[in-house]
Amino acid sequence: MMAFFSGLFGLRRGPWEMVATIIISLGVVMLMQPFVMWAFTYSFITTLVGTVMFIVVSHFRE
């Protein structure tokens, strides 16, 4: 667990890619659920932010 947080604070690629992937997954889940309108409304922007974040952090050092 400490390695994960030290990777986040050290700007390492692995932990940040995992965070971006979780954000993308959250956006897809928000898109597919039929119950909460605000979640559906913000699903595209959440997925977009996760995708752009993944592109940016893929340039971080290992």
Image (cartoon, rainbow, N blue to C red):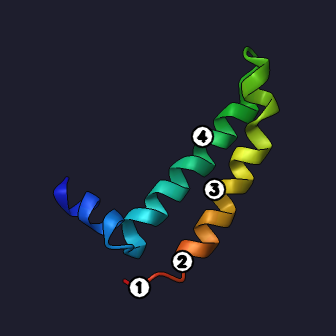
C-alpha distance separating marks 1 and 2: 8 Å
C-alpha distance separating marks 4 and 2: 19 Å
At label 3, counting other C-alpha atoms closer than 10 Å, the crowd grade (few under 14, some 14-19, many 20 or more) is many
Q: How many marks?
A: 4
- Residue 11 as seen in the image, left or right of residue 57: left
- The x and y percentages for residue 26 are 60, 40
C-alpha distance separating marks 1 and 3: 19 Å
- The x and y percentages for residue 2 are 17, 57
Which dot marks residue 58? 2
Seen as rendered, the residue at the extreme front is 9
Under mark 4, the amino acid is: Leu
Residue at 54%, 58% in the rendered image: 20
- The x and y percentages for residue 6 are 24, 65
Sequence-earlier tag: 3 or 4: 4
Residues at circles 2 and 3 in contact by the CB criterion of under 8 Å:
no
Residue at 32%, 65% in the rendered image: 9
Mark 4 lies on residue = 26
Mark 1 lies on residue = 61
Would you identify the image quadrant in which residue 61 lies? Answer: bottom left
- Residue 53 as seen in the image, left or right of residue 47: left
At label 1, counting other C-alpha atoms closer than 10 Å, the crowd grade (few under 14, some 14-19, many 20 or more) is few
Residue at 47%, 81% in the rendered image: 60
> Considering the numbered disc 3 on the image, is that residue within a helix, a strand or a loop?
helix
Residues at circles 3 and 4 in contact by the CB criterion of under 8 Å:
yes
> Considering the numbered disc 2 on the image, is that residue within a helix, a strand or a loop?
loop
Sequence-earlier tag: 1 or 3: 3
C-alpha distance separating marks 3 and 4: 9 Å
Under mark 2, the amino acid is: Ser
Point out the frontmost of discs 4 and 1: 1
Which dot marks residue 50? 3
